Image: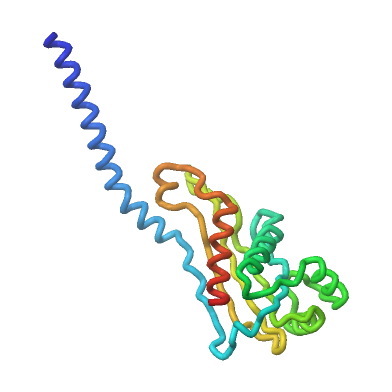
């Protein structure tokens, strides 16, 4: 009996020591991860707003397909579709249907649907009867990895051009998702791509219009 109690005491002691060791290791690694994460994080793009422009005067817009720098070939279509839906739900801007916009772009003879020139945007604005044209660039979209950690990320910038003058009146950026402390320490895939896309575009709309 004494031997069994001794063995139980030894096992309990080992468990406690193992727990203490894990806690100590966590406390040691956490500051390292925090510093590393801060060093690797990209700075948020600054928000530009023309102080002389009343964004509320722009109530009908055309949303162009975004320039896609990510590896996902469908990123531009997905982001544009979600942004269009969210702008319509927001209610402050009406978005010209994509099919009508495509037809007018063809009639206008715009060479680059993704990045029209200032002159082309002014011309297109008059043809589709909008006050503004929204363009953008998707820098990252999809899964990123760092060692054993992985997560979804989206990073994009969006510009609003006023068509009467062809001037960019607002330019914003947003980055959501990515590998955080939890993913670095414990693994996991992070948030679903659709969720972080919605978060990023909510951020974009707020910066553009509020």
Where residue 23 sits, quadrant-wise, is top left
Nearest the viewer among 39 and 57 is 57
Q: Residue furthest left?
A: 2
- Percent of width and height locating residue 67: 69, 66
- Percent of width and height locating residue 124: 79, 80
- Residue at screen point 71% across, 55% down: 73
- Percent of width and height locating residue 4: 17, 12
Residue 168 horizontal side relative to residue 110, left or right? left
**Compared to 154, does 15 lie above or below?**
above
Nearest the viewer among 41 and 13 is 13
- Residue at screen point 61% across, 71% down: 158
**Compared to 188, does 47 lie above or below?**
below
**Compared to 148, does 9 lie above or below?**
above
Count the numbered circles shown. 0
- Residue at screen point 61% across, 56% down: 141
- Percent of width and height locating residue 191: 52, 50
Where residue 197 sits, quadrant-wise, is bottom right
């Amino acid at each position: 009996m004494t031997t069994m109690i001794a063995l139980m005491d030894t096992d309990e002691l080992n468990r406690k020591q193992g727990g203490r060791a894990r806690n100590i290791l966590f406390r040691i690694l956490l500051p390292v991860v925090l510093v590393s994460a801060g060093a690797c994080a990209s700075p948020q793009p600054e928000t530009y707003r023309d102080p002389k422009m009343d964004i509320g005067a722009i109530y009908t817009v055309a949303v162009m397909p975004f320039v896609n720098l990510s590896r996902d070939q469908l990123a531009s279509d997905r982001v544009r579709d979600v942004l269009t839906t969210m702008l319509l739900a927001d209610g402050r801007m009406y978005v010209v249907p994509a099919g009508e916009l495509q037809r007018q772009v063809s009639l206008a003879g715009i060479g680059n649907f993704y990045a029209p020139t200032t002159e082309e945007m002014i011309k297109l604005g008059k043809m589709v009867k909008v006050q503004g044209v929204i363009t953008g660039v998707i820098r990252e979209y999809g899964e990123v990895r760092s060692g054993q950690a992985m997560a979804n990320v989206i990073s994009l910038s969006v510009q609003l051009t006023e068509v009467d003058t062809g001037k960019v009146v607002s330019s914003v950026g947003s980055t959501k998702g990515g590998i955080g402390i939890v993913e670095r320490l414990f693994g996991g895939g992070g948030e679903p791509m659709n969720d972080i896309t919605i978060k990023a575009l909510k951020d974009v709309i707020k910066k553009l219009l509020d």
